[in-house]
Image (cartoon, rainbow, N blue to C red):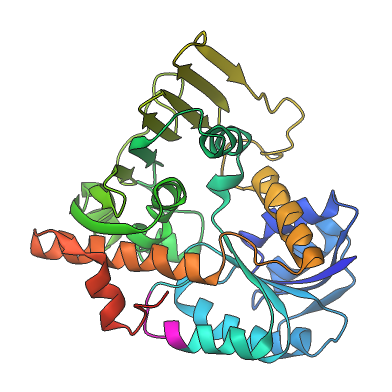
Amino acid sequence: MLKAGILGLGEGRSALAAISSMENWQTRWICDLDQQLLDARKSEFSISRTTTDYDEMLADPEVDVIFIYTPDPFHADHILKAFSAGKHVFCTKPLVDSLEKGQELLKAQKASGKELIVGHTSRFYPTTMQQYSDFKEGRLGEIVSCETHYNSDKRLGSAGKRGKKGEVNWLYSGLCHPLDLVFWFLGPIKSVSAMSVLSPAGKRLGSRVPDSFHAVLKAETGALGQVSGVYGAASTVQEAHPQSGCILRGDKGSSVASAPQFEYSTNLDGFPQTTSSFPDDAGEYFPWGGSKYHVGETRNLLVHFAECLQRQQSPRPNLKDGLKVVAILKAIQLSMESNCQVEVSDVLRKYGLVDL
């Protein structure tokens, strides 16, 4: 039985719901500075141990894994404290919003001997899991292109206080979803070229950073990646263009995975074209409707994490994976600002992370 302490109970609701449906996980503590939210989650999930003090939760030797769902700028410090306390870590995406403490995080993990998994939950949709299985089996042949997107209508701001004030950096909070899929399928990224815009809605919210992005990437293998995320405009009709998607094109076939409709299509040489559906009729993935929370994906991720901990293996995406994704995001940011192609290796070199 793995016992969890959950820090941050907004998006942390996903982990609470996922754990409540699993036999080998148990929530031991919940922690949040918002007493009203703390009380609400205590009642909703019947949690006995609650606190507004992170250190109190860390001090409990019964806690095996700390779940970090705090605002992005606090992730690094909260991870460091968890490692120092001898805990494994689940950290929601993005791992961090800056590489300044990248070396410190790597050293802290090595000293602790503990594991970390990043909550890049798009890897754990039923459709992308099937897509990855086909990819690993070589059914698509050598990959030529990977095209991903994650779009969400945030014209009125996101649900949290920072979102309503226009303080969310959507490059790191939003684009990290589809970018991680490109990294997952293509491996190390060599260079990026990107453009962005701050939408009228973003300006009204008072945001000072872009909220809509298109980027082209080149992997070290030579394959191409395309990533897009639009967060300041109206959503499309989901049946016409789903919120999230990943297209893989290889020299032996192609595949398309979408969410939250959960449809998966293949066009493989020598086989009939196929389209499969993974209906969420029981609400296992989105129990509260819509697609805000990531309950089903988090459950799939935690199955993987538990198996890795039992086998004493590093989970994926791990700390190094998370830092590599942030390095690519930083390269995209630099490309947007300079209107030039940026080498990811230059970003890694600047922060002393060349050996990642």
Image x and y of residue 77, in percent: 53, 85
- Is residue 99 covered in magenta? yes
Residue 230 in the figure: left or right of residue 52: left
Residue 54 in the figure: left or right of residue 244: right
Residue at point 77% right, 83% down?
Answer: 57
Image x and y of residue 296, in percent: 69, 43
Residue 61 or 247: which is nearer the viewer? Answer: 247
Magenta stretch prevailing secondary structure: loop
Q: Examine the rendering and report whether any part of residue 209 can be seen.
A: no
> Residue 339 occupies which quadrant of the picture?
bottom left
View extreme (top): residue: 272
Q: Examine the rendering and report whether any part of residue 174 can be seen.
A: yes
Residue at point 85% right, 86% down?
Answer: 61
Give the magenta part as a residue range: 98-103
Residue at point 35% right, 57% down?
Answer: 170
- On-image quarter of the C terminus: bottom left
In this rendering, the answer to whether 267 lies above or below 77 is above
In this rendering, the answer to whether 293 lies above or below 315 is above
In this rendering, the answer to whether 318 lies above or below 78 is above
Residue at point 37% right, 80% down?
Answer: 353
Residue 221 or 326: which is nearer the viewer? Answer: 221
Residue 301 in the figure: left or right of residue 145: right
Residue 289 in the figure: left or right of residue 225: right
